[in-house]
Image: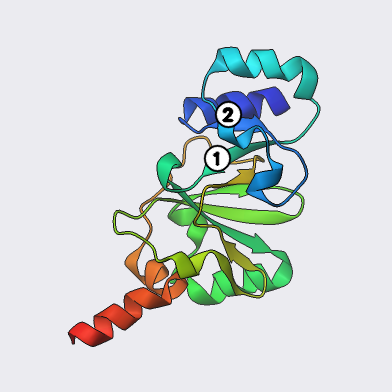
């Protein structure tokens, strides 16, 4: 099962690596070696096949994750999204969270976004990772909608006000 999910992620072009249970990217020695090479995964698998795996995220990997934790994260999603996010983009389900995956925005995000934007909602915009879990292999990762960018990056709204 684990190997199947890893292979699906590689086919999507996602960079994967063995996940060491630490939240910080600095605590992920394999993040810097994230790969979509099946050969490299085969080398790692005997040592790390029973561990969780992750995908690399951030601008260089073209993935902007929105991590939702617990009831408060799900409630934020329900109240913030104009329609069900499962209709518009791919998600990863793990035991502890749901992660919405979007394409990295073409316009840059400000540095102030790398934080918890509300209780239960985390948006890591620096080089990071999300734990690999179940996802829909046929559903694309969609562009990040403008309304969501404005919601997670307050500086975008400030610029719009100055121009008006």
x, y (%) of residue 33? 58, 29
Q: Is residue 116 above or below residue 58?
A: below
Left or right of residue 159: residue 131: right
Mark 1 or mark 2: whose residue is earlier in sequence: 2
Quadrant of the image occupied by residue 131: top right
x, y (%) of residue 28? 68, 40
Figure quadrant of the C terminus: bottom left
Q: Nearer the viewer, residue 58 or 132?
A: 58
Question: From where the camera sits, is residue 49 visible?
Answer: no
Q: Which of 95 and 153 is in front in this view?
A: 153
Determine which of the numbered discs, if any, sits on residue 56 in the image: 1
Q: Is residue 11 above or below residue 122?
A: above
Q: Which residue lies furthest to the left in this view?
A: 164
Q: Nearer the viewer, residue 3 or 42?
A: 42
x, y (%) of residue 76? 59, 74
Pointer 2 residue: 33
Quadrant of the image occupied by residue 40: top right
User: Which residue appears at 49% of the width and 60% of the height?
Assistant: 85
User: Which residue appears at 43% of the width and 55% of the height?
Assistant: 88
Q: How crowded is mark 2: few (under 14 residues within 10 Å), some or many (20 or more)?
A: some
User: Which residue appears at 49% of the width and 25% of the height?
Assistant: 11
Left or right of residue 52: residue 36: left
Left or right of residue 36: residue 53: right
Left or right of residue 82: residue 131: right
Figure quadrant of the N terminus: top right
Q: Residues within 10 Å of mark 1 (few under 14, many from 20)?
A: many
């Amino acid at each position: 099962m684990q190997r199947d999910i890893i292979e699906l992620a590689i086919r999507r072009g996602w960079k994967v690596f063995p996940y060491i249970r630490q939240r910080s990217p600095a605590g992920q020695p394999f993040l810097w070696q994230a790969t979509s090479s099946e050969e490299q995964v085969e080398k790692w698998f005997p040592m790390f096949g029973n561990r969780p795996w992750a995908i690399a995220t951030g601008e260089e990997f073209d993935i902007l994750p929105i991590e939702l934790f617990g009831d408060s994260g799900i409630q934020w999603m329900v109240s913030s999204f104009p329609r069900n996010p499962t209709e518009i983009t791919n998600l990863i389900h793990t035991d502890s969270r749901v992660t919405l995956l979007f394409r990295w925005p073409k316009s840059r995000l400000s540095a102030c976004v790398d934080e918890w934007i509300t209780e239960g909602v985390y948006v890591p915009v620096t080089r990071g990772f999300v734990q690999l879990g179940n996802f829909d292999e046929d559903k694309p990762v969609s562009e990040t909608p403008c309304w969501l960018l404005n919601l997670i990056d307050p500086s975008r709204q400030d610029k719009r006000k100055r121009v008006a």
